[in-house]
Amino acid sequence: MSDFPNKLQHKLDKRYNENSIRQLGKSTSLVDFSSNDYLGFARNEELFSKTFQLLLSKNIAQNGATGSRLLTGNYPLFSELEQMLAEFHNVENALVFNSGYDANIGFFGAVPQRGDFVFYDEWIHASIRDGLLMSHAKSYKFLHNDLTDLKKKIATILHSKTDHVDSEIYVVTESVFSMDGDSPDIHELVHLCKTNGWRLVIDEAHAVGVFGNKGQGLVQELGLQEDVFARLVTFGKAMGVHGAAILGENRLKDYLVNFARSFIYSTALPPHGSVSILSAYNFLMNEGNRERQQLKENIVFFKEGLKKKKLDTHFIESDSAIQCCVLPNNDTVKLVSGKLALKGFDVKAILSPTVPKGAERLRFCIHSYNSKEELGLVLQLLSDYI
């Protein structure tokens, strides 16, 4: 075998030297404060049984989709699934993708056109950034959750361009940010976009299942779904399964079917994947209320514990299941994470360059199945260590 390319080795060495090398995790028996399984659906035996029963009731005995949905993979269950998603999320239509990453690169690689402008929050998910790299539109970041900076950036760019009469302006954010757990002022964003004719796109990956009177997400909790051009919902977080969907009007779905390359050129989800999504949503709408209520109580309990132990100044303000303790320096945050692991708690250290240098943090993911004893003890340990 030939020598490994020097340029690649240099980049690996740099990560090792900065103590920021990524490695694949291993399954542990530690108390879970790191997974995205906020409602415990991924490990719920009742839901597993219901999914199996739904497979049997639909007489599905097929392992794979056999092709992309434009070839042989568009089995009838997709229509039922997408109709259910559209009704639950109060939108004209939905298009299922194999993952949130596929959905975002498909959407942003296809929808913004040459001559258009995309303004995105500086801490937007990497999949959106990668999609924008595939786009012919010009894209610009604005300061995190800073709508004053957004307006300033748009005004500056448009003032410098003389040929933007036919340009579309897309504003992109997340309803709950994955590395901070915080949210933008969606009401004000909607007002800005409606007033100026901009198109608002919101990634709801970490809001679905957690916010809304039935877990529909933060946009629907605020009653703003009709004012958002497109929403991304994913099923690998609170829903506990796999896949994602873009929500929007019928014409958006038609457009994506024709031009989103990650949709056109991917083998479709297998039938079991679609049944799993249907089953998870059915569970959320019926039995899932107890898990959602318990999650809300645990978030409140955790935040009250932060104040009692005077830890709240270390944490980013968040009402979501993601609570982040900023401990600058990769070495420091890895050290505290390691100490918590030795005491039986799985709390992930989020390192730069995943987050900006100086903003390294411990990311606590709160779940419906975390007990009050576990929440209290992990906070006591954190207090001792920092």
Image (cartoon, rainbow, N blue to C red):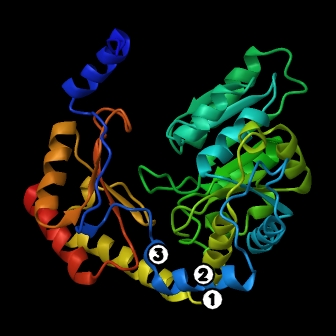
Asked whether the residues under the numbered discs 2 and 3 touch, taking CB atoms below 8 Å apart as contact, a structural biologist would say no
Q: Are there few (<14), some (14-19), or many (20+) residues within 10 Å of tag 2?
A: some
> Which one is earlier in the sequence, the residue at label 1 or at label 3?
3
Q: CA distance from mark 1 to mark 2?
A: 17 Å
Give the residue at mark 1.
286
Residue 167: percent from left, percent from top: 85, 28
- Report which quarter residue 215 is drawn in: bottom right
- Between discs 2 and 3, the one toward the N terminus: 3
Left or right: 161 as drawn, with respect to 43: right
User: Which sits in the foreground, 209 or 47?
Assistant: 47
- Which of the pair 365/263 is nearer the observer? 263
Residue on which disc 3 sits: 39
SS for dot 2 = helix
| Quarter residue 343 falls in | bottom left
Residue 298, relative to residue 32: is it above or below?
below
Q: Quadrant of the N terminus?
A: top left
The residue positioned 75% from the left and 63% from the top of the image is 225
Residue type marked 3? Leu
* Residue located 78% across and 73% down the image: 84
- Residue position marked by numbered label 2 in the rendering: 52
291 to 354, vertically: above or below: below
Measured in 3D between alpha carbons, the distance from the residue under mark 2 to the one under mark 3, in whole angstroms, is: 20 Å
Q: Secondary structure at mark 3?
A: loop
Give above or below for 3 relative to 234: above
- Tell me the crowding category of disc 3: few under 14, some 14 to 19, or many 20 or more residues within 10 angstroms, Cα based: many
